[in-house]
Image (tube, helix red, strand yellow):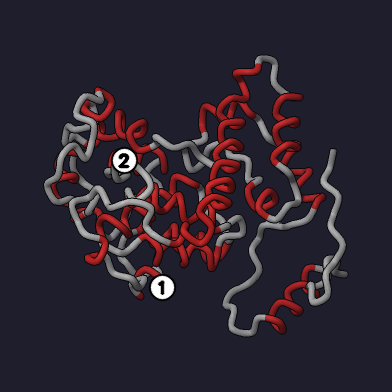
């Protein structure tokens, strides 16, 4: 059953507008320091139902890791209570022939529920490192402020500047791009995860402290058993080369190399940062670009997509 809208509270903004221009005018009045136009993503129940009707669980399972994959786009509606997890679950089961066809998408709903339950358990503790970093670096060595070139999209890396531009202009970013950007900021730029997490929350339409902050900690390794990182082959494969072709930094790409090579560059020596017995990681350790893109996807995507 569709969720019942809650009654307005005193001080709430209006919920209905004569036009999108009227919405934009009100927001400009209420938030004069906010920059840029409205996100092209429309909200509301009608838009949510239209999105939900287009969900294809089988295609999602096969292509969700690609930036052009069949992701659902439902996260902003779930975040703001326009859709419930139960509604999405029921819609998935109604359009699959075999229960396993919806497994990947249902698993994602489970992750979202998990983050919320962790928030209930940890409270404001989600803003703190849950564990020591498994990078060989002390938490105090990470910068606490987001670099200006990152905030302004002037890094010279086509991928990261592109992700930044999409984030601030649309309020949404594919989860794989979120992981790449988080890993780059934390492990290559040595910026503390919270600086990046707080920045994401400034812009994400689907941003909530639970999913956002704990996912950043997962990348950083303060809420996981090892750091998440990637290489150029992985990024090229799942972005279909859209950023690497013509990137001004292509000849000096910081992501070039095998996982072994990048691990030695990024992390101080410590026991078993990566599972040496994991064959899928071993397959991605060759320096050839074509080979780098094969095993790294699985290694990179130990956590599912939104």
Q: How far apart in space, not on screen, are marks 2 and 1 (Cα)?
A: 32 Å
The picture places residue 13, in percent across and down from the top left corner, at 79, 73
Q: Could you say whether the residue bearing mark 2 is in a helix, strand or loop?
A: loop
Q: Helix or strand or loop: what does disc 1 sit on?
A: helix
In the rendered view, would you say 39 is above or below 118? Answer: below
Which of the 4 quarters of the picture holds residue 17? bottom right
- Which of the two labelled residues, at mark 2 and mark 1, occupies the earlier sequence position? 1
Give the number of the mark in front: 2 or 1.
2
Tell me: 291 left or right of 212: left
Which residue has dot 2 on it? 225
Q: Count numbered badges in the picture.
A: 2
Of the 4 image quadrants, the one containing the C terminus is top right
**290 above or below 212?**
above
Q: Nearer the viewer, residue 265 or 277?
A: 277
Judging by the rendered image, the residue that carries numbered circle 1 is 152
Crowd band around label 1 with a 10 angstrom C-alpha radius: few (<14), some (14–19), many (20+):
few
The residue drawn where x is 85% and y is 66% is 8
Q: Residue at x 84, y 58 (%)?
A: 6
Where residue 114 appears, as percent x and y from the top left, is: 55, 41
Above-or-below relation of 201 to 231: below
Q: Are marks 2 and 1 in contact (CB under 8 Å)?
A: no
Quadrant in the picture for residue 37: bottom right
Q: Residues within 10 Å of mark 2 (few under 14, many from 20)?
A: some
């Amino acid at each position: 059953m569709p969720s019942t809208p809650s009654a307005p509270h005193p001080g709430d903004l209006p919920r209905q507008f004569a036009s999108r221009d009227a919405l934009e005018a009100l927001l400009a009045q209420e938030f004069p320091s906010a920059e840029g136009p409205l996100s092209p993503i429309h909200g509301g129940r009608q838009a949510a139902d239209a999105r939900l009707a287009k969900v294809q669980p089988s295609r999602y399972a096969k292509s969700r890791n690609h930036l052009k994959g069949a992701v659902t786009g439902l996260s902003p509606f779930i975040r703001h209570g326009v859709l419930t997890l139960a509604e999405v679950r029921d819609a998935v089961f109604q359009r699959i022939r075999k229960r396993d066809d919806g497994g990947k998408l249902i698993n994602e709903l489970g992750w979202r529920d998990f983050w919320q339950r962790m928030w209930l358990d940890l409270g404001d503790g989600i803003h703190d490192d849950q564990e020591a970093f498994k990078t060989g670096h002390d938490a105090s060595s990470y910068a606490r402020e987001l670099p200006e070139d990152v905030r302004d999209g002037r890094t010279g890396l086509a991928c990261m500047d592109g992700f930044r531009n999409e984030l601030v202009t649309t309020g949404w970013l594919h989860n794989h791009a979120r992981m790449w950007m988080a890993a780059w900021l934390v492990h290559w730029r040595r910026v503390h995860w919270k600086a990046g997490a707080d920045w994401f929350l400034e812009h994400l339409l689907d941003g909530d402290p639970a999913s956002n902050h704990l996912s950043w900690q997962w990348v950083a390794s303060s809420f996981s058993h090892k750091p998440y990182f990637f290489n150029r082959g992985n990024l090229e494969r799942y972005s279909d080369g859209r950023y690497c072709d013509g990137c001004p930094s292509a000849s000096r790409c910081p992501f070039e190399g095998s996982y072994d090579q990048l691990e030695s560059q990024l992390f101080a020596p410590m026991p078993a940062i990566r599972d040496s017995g994991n064959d899928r990681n071993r397959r991605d350790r060759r320096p050839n670009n074509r080979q780098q893109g094969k095993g790294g996807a699985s290694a990179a995507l130990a956590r599912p997509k939104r």
